[in-house]
């Protein structure tokens, strides 16, 4: 595949690093700053082979069905709810996102909030702005030597662990999966064990049926008296009314909440929460991952996924597609094939190759319930002709030669 023949459309003000990186690879890149409507996309997309969006552009089944020539879509953000992933897969279009580009940003916010809670920074700041001088050491403590309990020791939780230990804190964590503790962190056998022993509890679990209402009245009462709760994971994890009660009774000394069961859809909508106006409560508008560094990292990460998928066929990290990552083999031609996952397709493909007398140097097939994705390195000068024959098979969705 010739890079110059691939045109990429990036919409919604994607960080400029994406355009830079893709142009360095020889792709042609056009930008538009707004989120195009379905009608606008249907007009624009026939001249592009790849599309990058952020969270506001909706990609419906119709967009994919009318543009089956698209190779790849990039969600230059974390979520992919705005994309009909199944419709994309049915057309053999891989979709990538950047789920971990903002990990460090969230971890840093959590550390800042822990210190802010421990020193009542939010309240002191508000009072000083109102002209009140509240100089007192009462209830203000260092975090050094205290224990942070991390619930969910994944990408973010483990970063918080490292930073907290650097501050001289003791780290304990709880996870449903056995995780290697970093530094001197210790895994606890149960959530209750963690809650009873932590001065700060920080939540870093995904939104699942098991984590819904995970922290309610019972768990809050199991926390140490005078401890703090931080939630920068998902709004469904904490029962807000139970937290309000725990704060009123002073059992919980403060909290920092970045995510809410109901969040305004845009900056123009009003935000309402029963936590508003309470003392030592930090409320932030889901900004855990919102930093310029994270935007840069997202731009670079998805651009790299485009490069790898378009140039070598690596679908590793695709959210709607079997993941295949076959190392490049010098001196071969690479054919990629997406097909309906039904018995016998690989046999048909290999039949075509052996009829030609070509030698398969490497081959990898990965399937999900609907499609199979095959990457094959061949010793043949007729790769394009073979790819055309493979594409003519009744179950083939898309076939291309990348080099
Ligand atoms: P991750 O998938 O890397 O880690 C989640 C961890 O939670 C895993 O280790 C998993 O085994 C564990 N886990 C799952 N269910 C559990 C349960 N019931 N009890 C205990 N542990 C459980 O996820 P990552 O990237 O660390 O993200 C964590 C959370 O942060 C997610 O909810 C994500 O949506 C949220 N997030 C919030 C942002 C913000 O702006 N506030 C930005 C980015 C992520």
Image (cartoon, rainbow, N blue to C red):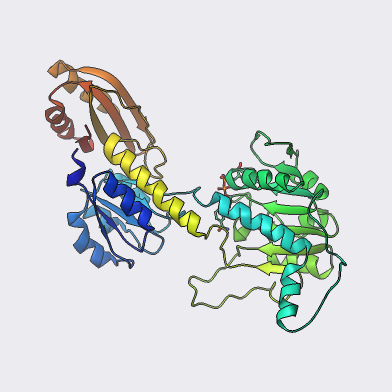
Residue 36, image quadrant: bottom left
Relative to residue 228, is residue 335 depicted above or below?
above
Q: Is residue 166 left or right of residue 236?
A: right
Return the residue found at the far right. Answer: 138
Compare residues 282 and 373 and report the one nearer the observer: 282
Residue at figure coordinates x 23%, y 30% from the top left: 335
Relative to residue 245, is residue 368 depicted above or below?
above
Residue 350, image quadrant: top left
Residue at figure coordinates x 41%, y 47% from the top left: 301
Quarter containing the N terminus: top left
Q: Position of residue 210 (x, y in %)?
A: 63, 49
Q: Position of residue 238 (x, y in %)?
A: 67, 59
Relative to residue 286, is residue 151 depicted above or below?
above
Q: Position of residue 62 (x, y in %)?
A: 26, 58
Q: Is residue 357 left or right of residue 273?
A: left
Say if residue 264 shows up in the picture: yes
Say if residue 208 shows up in the picture: no
Compare residues 182 and 255 and report the one nearer the observer: 182
Q: Position of residue 63 (x, y in %)?
A: 26, 57
Compare residues 241 and 295 and report the one nearer the observer: 295
Residue at figure coordinates x 71%, y 42% from the top left: 174
């Amino acid at each position: 595949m010739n890079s110059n023949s691939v045109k990429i459309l990036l919409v919604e003000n994607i960080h400029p690093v994406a355009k830079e990186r893709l142009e360095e690879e020889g792709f042609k890149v056009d930008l538009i700053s707004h989120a195009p409507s379905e009608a606008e996309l249907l007009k624009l997309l026939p001249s592009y082979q790849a599309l990058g969006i952020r969270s506001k552009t909706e990609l419906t089944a119709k967009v994919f069905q009318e543009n089956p020539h698209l190779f790849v879509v990039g969600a230059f953000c974390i979520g992919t709810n705005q994309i009909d992933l199944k419709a994309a897969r049915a057309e053999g279009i891989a979709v990538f996102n950047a789920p971990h580009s903002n990990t460090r940003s969230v971890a840093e916010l959590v550390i800042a909030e822990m210190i802010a809670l421990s020193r009542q920074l939010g309240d002191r700041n508000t009072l000083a702005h109102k002209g009140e001088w509240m100089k007192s050491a009462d209830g203000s403590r260092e975090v050094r030597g205290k224990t942070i309990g991390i619930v969910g020791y994944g990408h973010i939780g483990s970063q918080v662990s490292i930073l907290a230990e650097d501050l001289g804190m003791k780290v304990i964590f709880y996870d449903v999966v056995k995780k290697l503790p970093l530094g001197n962190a210790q895994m606890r056998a149960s959530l209750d064990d963690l809650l009873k022993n932590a001065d700060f509890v920080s939540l870093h679990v995904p939104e699942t049926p098991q984590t819904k209402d995970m922290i309610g009245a019972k768990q809050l009462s199991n926390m140490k008296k005078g401890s703090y709760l931080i939630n920068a994971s998902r709004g469904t994890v904490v029962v807000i009314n139970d937290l309000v009660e725990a704060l009123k009774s002073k059992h919980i000394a403060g909290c920092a909440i970045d995510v809410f069961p109901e969040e305004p859809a845009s900056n123009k909508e009003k935000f309402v929460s029963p936590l508003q106006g309470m003392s030592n409560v930090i409320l932030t508008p889901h900004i855990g991952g919102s930093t310029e560094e994270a935007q840069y990292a997202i731009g670079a990460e998805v651009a790299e996924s485009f490069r790898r998928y378009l140039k070598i066929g690596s679908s590793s990290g695709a959210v709607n597609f079997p993941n295949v990552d076959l190392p490049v083999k010098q001196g071969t031609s690479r054919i990629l094939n997406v097909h309906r996952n039904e018995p016998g397709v690989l046999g048909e493909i290999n039949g075509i190759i052996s009829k030609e007398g070509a030698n398969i140097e490497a081959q990898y097939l990965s399937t999900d319930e609907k499609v199979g994705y095959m990457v094959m390195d061949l010793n043949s000068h007729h790769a394009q002709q073979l790819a055309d024959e493979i594409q003519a098979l009744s179950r083939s969705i898309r076939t291309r030669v990348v080099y």
